[in-house]
């Protein structure tokens, strides 16, 4: 059966039997696993459809797909082996199982809080994105003078344009109902009950109470106080609000759990919803709703006061903070404040500076794409292309962030410079606002007020980050060496298709031979392409016993370890040095026959930063069997507490039939250590 991205992803995370639950967001598959400890990240990230992988606490694991996430999600659910996943397990069962595993860390409560925020917005991101493009279209038409200022008070649009304007309002006006549904579901309550509770305060009849006899107008006409059975009821506009439904859902979730403990299961279907609504509708209308509206407004006013005091400081802080807020989920509360600003102020002042961060993020991705094309790195080219498209067209930063930037730490400082440049331009220009909640992409630039200033700022952010990444690179020396070795291996493999493989060290057999088996029938014996000598004198250690799981599990390559008894490492055969770390701890070789090798001197010895190592070669050097690569001081390594066991690995084993240990016990330099056979 042909392999597929869905099948490859499930196999890479331990199979369907390891999956407890699976959901997805706008760009990521979100797994809850029985055990995430054995997942090999390079294997997951090596799947063509995968842009990146993100381990999380509590055996949760995310796989970044990008815009095709829903397709891959559906394909995974369609796999035969996934049919039984989640059978008989409710959300509460899964959560109970997770809690039984123990605490998820010091900030588990905070982690859960931001998860709830994320899960409350995640399912409606597509609707928000679609609506934001309608808003952008209306803003563009107004800018071009086709229609009047569509969002100005008292403006009446021709019926056709008024109808188009309604296309986005349905999403934002009824946003509280969507959030109430999602948040209630996430917190273990009946989502339709949460929807119904929130709907009460959005009814025209509820708003009409503000015109009752004796109603008192407060908050500059934004609300009215009405006496209901002697209690003060605050009547205000709940359209586009997000804090009230979030608070309501939190209270509803606790109430639902309490009611289920005291109401018999046989009548819960009737009385849990009834009593929930009986309690929560007045609590929401009298208490939670006003707290959410005016508490959120207070947060917005606080941020507005900072922006009013110094647009420059505000425009610098926001884009510099976002690269650290997004990975932690801290941006969700700000998204809620943006929506509230538009509702209460008529505009938002956060999204403009946020655009500087987004475009710096996309610019860094563009720089990576340029370097990947130049280096012929097809996997990174695919990842960066998908991430850049999701960013520039959809304003979605997660594929760039999780698929690239968090994996390569050299990117962040360059990206932050781009954020700073864009923020400074916006701040010096007096700030940028928008009258609608939009995703900051190329398509939504017309939705911002002062379009030239905003366009200049985001362009500066984009190109600054891109140029800095191109000039400095995004790979560390080790990552660059690995990439070069992989490219060399791929090139060698391609050449090997058109030419016979030459013997490397001591050829044991030049072709497959026939040996008579019992009964007189000939049996084929595998061709041994090469016998590789030991690069250092010492005692052979089986690969499984090497004291580092990255090596012992064969993740890097196949071979053995050698516990050195001498202090010089030599080239095991003729070839070229692909990698010669200045720290002396690792060497990558491409032997003349196309075999790629890694010799890693000790475990974790990179931490010595070259202390105790005397490197004899550099990348690009030609070596022969017996050429010294490095001399090391074993006393320095042992005093630092590091193991001297030296993995000697073939790192492109898939090109060959097998990699076999050829010796045990004591070996000297050049003694047969590994045999490589043909497929």
Image: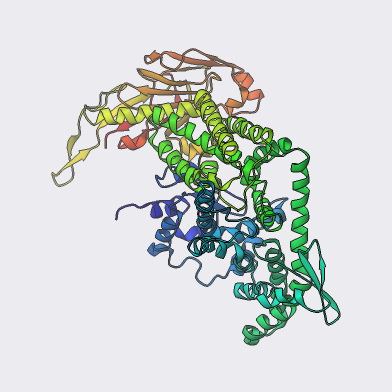
Judge whether 660 appears above or below 532 on screen. Answer: below
Q: Nearer the viewer, residue 679 or 129?
A: 129
Confirm whether residue 375 shows in the render.
no
Name which quarter of the figure residue 156 lies in: bottom right
Extreme right residue here? Answer: 230
Q: Position of residue 669 (x, y in %)?
A: 43, 18
Viewport quadrant of the C terminus: top left
Q: Nearer the viewer, residue 335 or 512?
A: 335
Say whether residue 580 is left or right of residue 118. left
Residue in the picture at 70% in, 78% down: 276
Say whether residue 657 is left or right of residue 671. left
Q: Nearer the viewer, residue 261 or 451?
A: 451
Judge whether 341 appears above or below 387 on screen. Answer: below
Q: Position of residue 495 (x, y in %)?
A: 26, 27
Name which quarter of the figure residue 676 lies in: top left
Viewport quadrant of the N terminus: bottom left
Residue in the picture at 49% in, 43% down: 392
Judge whether 10 appears above or below 313 on screen. Answer: below
Say whether residue 7 is left or right of residue 527. right
Q: Position of residue 253 (x, y in %)?
A: 69, 70
State the scheme by which the image is colored: rainbow
Residue in the picture at 30% in, 31% down: 493
Q: Nearer the viewer, residue 316 or 642?
A: 316
Q: Position of residue 624 (x, y in %)?
A: 37, 14
Confirm whether residue 602 shows in the render.
yes
For the image shown, how many numbered marks are present on the structure?
0
């Amino acid at each position: 059966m042909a392999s597929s991205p869905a099948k490859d992803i499930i196999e890479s995370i331990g199979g369907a039997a390891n999956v407890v639950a699976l959901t997805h967001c706008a760009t990521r598959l979100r797994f809850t696993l029985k055990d995430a400890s054995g997942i090999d990240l390079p294997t997951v990230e090596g799947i063509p459809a995968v842009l990146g992988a993100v381990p999380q606490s509590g055996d949760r694991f995310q796989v970044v797909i990008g815009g095709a996430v829903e397709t891959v999600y559906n394909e995974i659910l369609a796999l035969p082996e996934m049919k039984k996943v989640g059978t008989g397990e409710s959300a509460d069962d899964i959560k109970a199982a997770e809690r039984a595993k123990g605490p998820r860390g010091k900030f588990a409560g905070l982690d859960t809080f931001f998860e709830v925020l994320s899960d409350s917005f995640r399912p409606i991101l597509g609707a928000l994105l679609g609506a934001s493009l309608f808003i952008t279209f209306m803003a563009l038409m107004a800018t071009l003078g086709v229609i009047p200022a569509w969002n100005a008070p008292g403006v009446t649009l021709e019926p056709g344009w008024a109808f188009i304007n309604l296309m986005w309002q349905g999403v934002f006006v009824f946003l509280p109902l969507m959030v109430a549904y999602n948040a209630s579901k996430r917190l273990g309550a009946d989502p339709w009950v949460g929807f119904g509770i929130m709907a009460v305060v959005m009814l025209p009849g509820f708003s009409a109470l503000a015109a009752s006899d004796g109603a008192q107008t407060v908050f500059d006409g934004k609300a009215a106080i009405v006496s209901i059975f002697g209690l003060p009821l605050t009547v205000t506009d709940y359209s586009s609000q997000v804090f009230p439904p979030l608070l309501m859902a939190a209270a509803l979730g606790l109430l639902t759990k309490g009611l289920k403990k005291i109401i018999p299961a046989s009548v819960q279907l009737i009385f849990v919803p009834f009593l929930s609504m009986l309690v929560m509708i007045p609590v929401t209308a009298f208490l939670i709703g006003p707290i959410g509206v005016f508490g959120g407004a207070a947060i917005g006013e606080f941020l507005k006061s900072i922006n009013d005091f110094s647009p420059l400081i505000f425009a610098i802080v926001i884009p510099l903070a976002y690269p650290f807020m997004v990975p932690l989920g801290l941006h969700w509360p700000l998204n809620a404040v943006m929506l509230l600003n538009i509702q209460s102020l008529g505009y938002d002042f956060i999204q403009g500076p946020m655009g500087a961060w987004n475009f710096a993020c996309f610019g860094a991705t563009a720089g990576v794409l340029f370097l990947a094309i130049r280096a012929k790195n097809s996997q990174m080219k695919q990842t960066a292309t998908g991430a850049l498209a999701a960013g520039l067209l959809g304003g979605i930063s997660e594929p760039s962030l999780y698929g690239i930037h968090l994996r390569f730490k050299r990117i962040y400082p360059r990206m932050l410079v781009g954020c700073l440049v864009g923020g400074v331009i916006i701040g010096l220009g007096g700030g940028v606002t928008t009258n609608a909640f939009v995703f900051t992409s190329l398509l939504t630039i017309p939705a911002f007020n002062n379009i030239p200033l905003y366009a200049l700022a985001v362009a500066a952010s984009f190109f600054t980050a891109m140029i800095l990444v191109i000039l400095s690179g995004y790979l560390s020396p080790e990552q660059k060496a690995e990439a070069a070795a992989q490219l060399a291996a791929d090139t060698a493999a391609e050449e090997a298709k058109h030419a016979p493989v030459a013997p490397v060290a001591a050829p044991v057999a030049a072709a497959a031979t026939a040996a008579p088996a019992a009964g007189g029938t000939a049996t084929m014996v595998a061709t041994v392409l090469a016998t590789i000598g030991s690069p250092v004198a010492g005692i052979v250690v089986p690969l499984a016993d090497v004291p580092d799981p990255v090596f012992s599990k064969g993740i890097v390559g196949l071979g053995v370890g050698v516990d050195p008894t001498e202090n010089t490492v030599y080239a095991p055969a003729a070839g070229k040095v692909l990698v010669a770390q200045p720290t002396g701890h690792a060497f990558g070789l491409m032997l003349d026959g196309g075999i790629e090798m890694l010799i890693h001197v000790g475990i974790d010895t990179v931490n010595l930063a070259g202390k105790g190592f005397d490197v004899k070669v550099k990348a690009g050097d030609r070596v022969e069997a017996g050429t010294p690569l490095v001399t090391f001081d074993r006393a320095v390594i042992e005093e630092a507490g590091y193991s001297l066991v030296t993995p000697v690995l073939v790192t492109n084993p898939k090109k060959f039939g097998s990699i076999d240990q050829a010796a045990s016990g004591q070996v000297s330099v050049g003694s047969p250590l590994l045999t490589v056979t043909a497929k």
